[in-house]
Image (spheres, grey):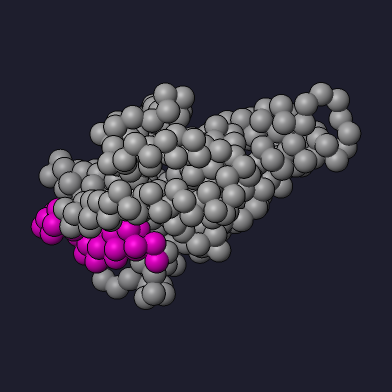
């Protein structure tokens, strides 16, 4: 069995990103008229979502699809459709996350709540522009959540297959929302230990990004328990490594690659494992700087450089990089299981490398 697609990125095996985009385009083309029938005033909702869904790495659909293939499922459009539903779930998470974080941009474009606030100001409507933007973005995220369910349930696979996957999808959404709350709680508490920050990583990102999408694909294909266990052994540490890499990029990443301003996570005061590790190892003087400058929305380039310096000098960056390497190695060792069908094993290996080095 061969795998088609560009050899440079495992996400393009079987032309998956192109197929996911087409499925999204087709689904939205059917949904936009439904909104138009309600009112032409809903066009800004459609436009915002269309713009958001033109970007993204499509990691969650990739892991769901290759979870299916690794369980012996054949390549088919129905499986791609089921996997694509996770991209709508991700859109919901991103829109709501940007509201909670007060982010200005997403994928190089204004975040949804900023976009709707600008719409309000431009039309000189009554009330608060920011309040309108927040409300509209929450509703758009809710719409994405509803549409994700609709796309999964209508994917075209046999009903018994979809019903096997539904409990996995249910717990996936529960864990995501629980993880989002824990993240919000850490922000409110001003952060804590690296152990608490790692708990957020596990439930907000690791399970949701990799482990549960793999489980979803496995359930659709009626995989044996041994393969589900293998997917956890691979997906959970890899998901943690993936989020830790994301945290590093949020502080040290190139804006051209991340789509967000340099050091934006520092301005937002995100209580990541990277930051918690720096706080635990900081001298009194360094800790005072972290308390004063972390979460300052007016943080300038010099302030970003000062905080970066503390993260480096405390050894936090070195520690997190070592943790990423160890977790990735753990994931790859689990992937050696004989229960994973080819060619999924090779693609999942490539995805592990790409997700933790951010070459996708």
- Closer to the camera in the image, 215 or 251: 251
Decide whether the magenta segment is chiefly helix, strand or loop: helix
Q: Residue at x 54, y 59 (%)?
A: 255
Percent coordinates x, y for residue 51 in the rendering? 65, 52
Percent coordinates x, y for residue 314 in the rendering? 30, 48
Q: Magenta residues?
A: 331-359
Q: Is residue 326 left or right of residue 314?
A: left
Does the magenta-highlighted stretch encompass residue 266?
Answer: no
Q: Residue at x 29, y 63 (%)?
A: 353
- Closer to the camera in the image, 252 or 118: 252
Examine the image and state in which quarter residue 200 appears: top left
Vertical placement of residue 175 versus 213, above or below: above
Q: Residue at x 43, y 39 (%)?
A: 290
Vertical placement of residue 294 versus 227, above or below: above
Locate the N terminus and report the quarter of the image it occupies.
bottom left
Q: Residue at x 45, y 48 (%)?
A: 307
Percent coordinates x, y for residue 129 in the rendering? 77, 31
Examine the image and state in which quarter residue 336 appears: bottom left
Using the rendered image of the protein, determine whether residue 195 is visible from the camera's viewpoint. Answer: yes
Does the magenta-highlighted stretch encompass residue 341?
Answer: yes
Vertical placement of residue 183 versus 53, above or below: above
- Closer to the camera in the image, 192 or 184: 192
- Residue occupying the far front of the picture: 285
Percent coordinates x, y for residue 218 in the rendering? 27, 46
- Residue occupying the far bottom of the picture: 7
Using the rendered image of the protein, determine whether residue 331 is visible from the camera's viewpoint. Answer: no
């Amino acid at each position: 069995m061969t795998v088609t697609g560009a050899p440079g990125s495992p996400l393009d095996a079987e032309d998956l990103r192109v197929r996911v985009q087409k499925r999204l385009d087709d689904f939205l083309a059917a949904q936009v008229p439904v909104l138009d029938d309600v009112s032409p005033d809903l066009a800004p909702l459609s436009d915002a979502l269309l713009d958001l869904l033109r970007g993204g790495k499509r990691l969650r659909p990739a892991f769901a699809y290759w979870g299916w293939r690794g369980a012996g499922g054949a390549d088919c459009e129905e499986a791609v459709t089921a996997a694509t539903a996770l991209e709508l779930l991700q859109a919901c998470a991103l829109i709501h996350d940007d509201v909670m974080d007060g982010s200005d941009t997403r994928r190089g474009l204004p975040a949804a709540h900023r976009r709707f606030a600008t719409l309000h100001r431009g039309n000189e409507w009554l009330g608060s522009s920011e309040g309108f933007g927040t409300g509209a973005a929450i509703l758009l995220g809710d719409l994405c959540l509803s549409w994700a369910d609709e796309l999964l349930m209508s994917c075209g696979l046999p009903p018994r297959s979809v019903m096997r996957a539904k409990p996995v999808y249910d717990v996936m959404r529960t864990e995501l929302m629980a993880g989002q709350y824990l993240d919000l709680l850490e922000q409110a508490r001003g952060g804590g230990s690296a152990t608490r920050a790692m708990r957020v990583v596990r439930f907000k990102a690791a399970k949701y990004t990799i482990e549960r999408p793999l489980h979803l694909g496995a359930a659709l294909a009626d995989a044996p328990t041994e393969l589900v266990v293998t997917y956890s052994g691979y997906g959970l540490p890899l998901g943690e490594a993936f989020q830790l890499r994301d945290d590093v990029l949020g502080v040290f990443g190139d804006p051209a690659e991340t789509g967000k301003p340099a050091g934006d996570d520092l301005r937002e005061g995100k209580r990541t494992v990277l930051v918690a590790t720096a706080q635990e190892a900081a001298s009194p003087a360094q800790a005072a700087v972290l308390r004063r400058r972390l979460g300052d929305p007016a943080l300038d380039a010099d302030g970003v450089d000062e905080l970066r310096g503390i993260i480096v000098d405390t050894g936090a960056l070195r520690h997190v990089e070592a943790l990423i390497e160890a977790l990735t190695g753990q994931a790859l060792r689990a992937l050696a299981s004989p229960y994973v069908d080819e060619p999924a094993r090779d693609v999942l290996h490539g995805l592990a490398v790409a997700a933790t080095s951010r070459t996708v």
